[in-house]
Image (cartoon, rainbow, N blue to C red):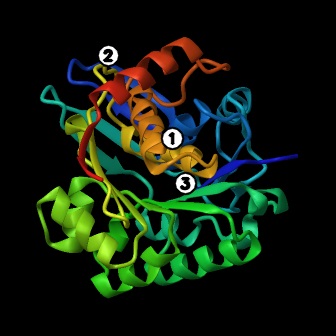
Amino acid sequence: MTIDYVTFSNLIIDDIVFPDGRTAMNTLGGAGVHALAGMRLWNGRLGYAATIGSDLDPTHRQSLQRFGVDTSGLVVREGYTTARAWQLFEANDLRIEVFRTKLDDFLHNMVAEADLPPAYRQAKGFHLIWGSFAALGKLLQSLRATNPDITLAVELTPQQEQEPADHLKLVLPHLSLFSPNLDEATAVSGLTNPTDMADLFLAWGAPLVAIRMGAEGSLVKTRAGEQWRLTAVPTHIVDVTGAGNGYLGGFLTGLGDGLSPFEASLRATVSASFALNQLGLPTWATPPKAEIEQRLSWVRQHAVCIST
């Protein structure tokens, strides 16, 4: 079994309430699911490392497998109930998440390096949203020691946002891509200007930074000084949850496949746009190639080079 890309993160069941009172209960969600959806547009050999409880609806595992995801990395923790959250949507596009699982239980039962199936360790790339910065740094070093050419992309957890900046500085040099959203970037940097944020994270050791700005697109900058702005793809929005995770998933596959940072970022933007089109996991089993190519062309045409 060959696994090319892995998310090392979480699985959360979302119970969604819309402004008009409609609901979508028992929806497969969490950062890992959305990152995998972003990867799946470009690759069909994916692995999912996360923890679940014995209560997980079997149809969710089946849906992942039909989608092209290996689920041998989903670990059942005894006495743990699969994480669950309310997602409350307001008419002004505001989303309020109410976590229904006790945070201590969620953190205590999160996936660990020892849970990884052997095949996952040889993957081209890992998407991670996990642990304290100290624990994350050790994990990144271990993954790279086993697989020196691995591509590593990290998202911040709410707990990491509260850690001192010096802790983040120890992690960034081990990454291939650091891509926070605006709020996360502000929390860890104290800055508000996206270009200033990118410059700071590069100075702290990140080789490549992509600041995600929601409907305003993203700003990407490399250590070599290349900088460009990408416009979000106009599309029908069903659910804004997970677009950022999908962005990282697409970016990861581009870098892992040997594309330039610019070309990889085009994939990221396309992946984010597809995340908006449905609740949870897409229902297609085969990526819609024609639509992918159309959106990829659109993003390329609307990219703005700031410096080279």
Q: Which residue appears at 64% of the width and 56% of the height?
A: 125
Q: Residues within 10 Å of mark 3 (few under 14, many from 20)?
A: many
Q: Secondary structure at mark 3?
A: loop
Whichever of labels 1 and 2 marks the residue nearer the N terminus, that label is 2
Give the image quarter of residue 111: bottom right
Compared to 23, does 28 lie above or below? below
Identify the residue position indicated by label 1 in the image: 250
Identify the residue position indicated by label 2 in the image: 236
Q: CA distance from mark 1 to mark 3?
A: 18 Å
Q: Residue furthest front?
A: 308
Q: CA distance from mark 1 to mark 2?
A: 19 Å
Q: Is residue 300 left or right of residue 251?
A: left
Whichever of labels 1 and 3 marks the residue nearer the N terminus, that label is 3
Whichever of labels 3 and 2 marks the residue nearer the N terminus, that label is 3
Q: Residues within 10 Å of mark 2 (few under 14, many from 20)?
A: few
Q: Is residue 275 left or right of residue 98?
A: right
Q: Which residue appears at 11% of the width and 62% of the height?
A: 192
Do residues under tags 1 and 2 come within 8 Å of each other at their CB atoms? no
Circle nearer the viewer, 1 or 2? 1
Q: Is residue 306 left or right of residue 300?
A: left
Q: Residue furthest top?
A: 290
Identify the residue position indicated by label 3 in the image: 10
- For badge 2, the amino acid type reads His
Q: CA distance from mark 3 to mark 2?
A: 27 Å
Q: Position of residue 278 (x, y in %)?
A: 43, 22
Q: Position of residue 304 (x, y in %)?
A: 24, 38
